[in-house]
Image: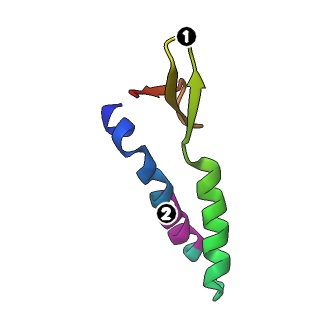
């Protein structure tokens, strides 16, 4: 979990590259902008979100992701 707290921002570009490889194998289009656009939207939907929530202690940063059961709280 500590590694995920430090490198959560790296998931978005990795997802784009992964989807580009998958999309390239499944569909044969020559339009690169179409490929990047579709893969970017998919990566945005599946990437983790960072929220700032207000608590009694103060503001905390929280990471939520579709593949995690509970949110991860980052140190301020």
The mark total stands at: 2
Mark 1 and mark 2: span between their CA atoms? 40 Å
Q: Which mark is residue 18?
A: 2
Question: In the rendered image, which residue does mark 1 sit on?
Answer: 56
Q: Quadrant of residue 20?
A: bottom right
Q: Position of residue 44 (x, y in %)?
A: 61, 54
Whether the magenta-drawn stretch holds residue 19 is answered as: yes
* Closer to the camera in the image, 6 or 65: 6
Identify the residue at horizontal 64%, vertical 80% (top origin).
Answer: 33
Q: Which residues are magenta?
A: 15-23
Q: Position of residue 42 (x, y in %)?
A: 64, 58
Q: Is residue 54 visible?
A: yes
Q: Above or below — where is 37 with respect to 57?
A: below
Local packing at callout 1 (Cα closer than 10 Å; few below 14, some 14-19, many 20+) is few
Q: Is 58 contained in the magenta span? A: no
The residue furthest bottom is 30
- The N terminus - image quarter: top left
Q: In the rendered view, does 49 fall on the left or right side of 75?
A: right
* Image location (x, y in percent) of residue 49: 57, 41
């Amino acid at each position: 979990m500590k590694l995920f707290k430090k490198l959560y921002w790296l998931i978005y570009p990795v997802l784009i590259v992964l989807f580009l490889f998958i999309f390239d194998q499944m569909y044969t289009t020559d339009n690169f902008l179409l490929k990047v656009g579709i893969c970017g939207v998919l990566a945005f939907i599946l990437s983790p979100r960072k929220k700032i929530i207000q608590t009694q202690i103060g503001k905390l940063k929280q990471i939520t992701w579709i593949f995690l059961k509970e949110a991860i709280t980052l140190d301020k």
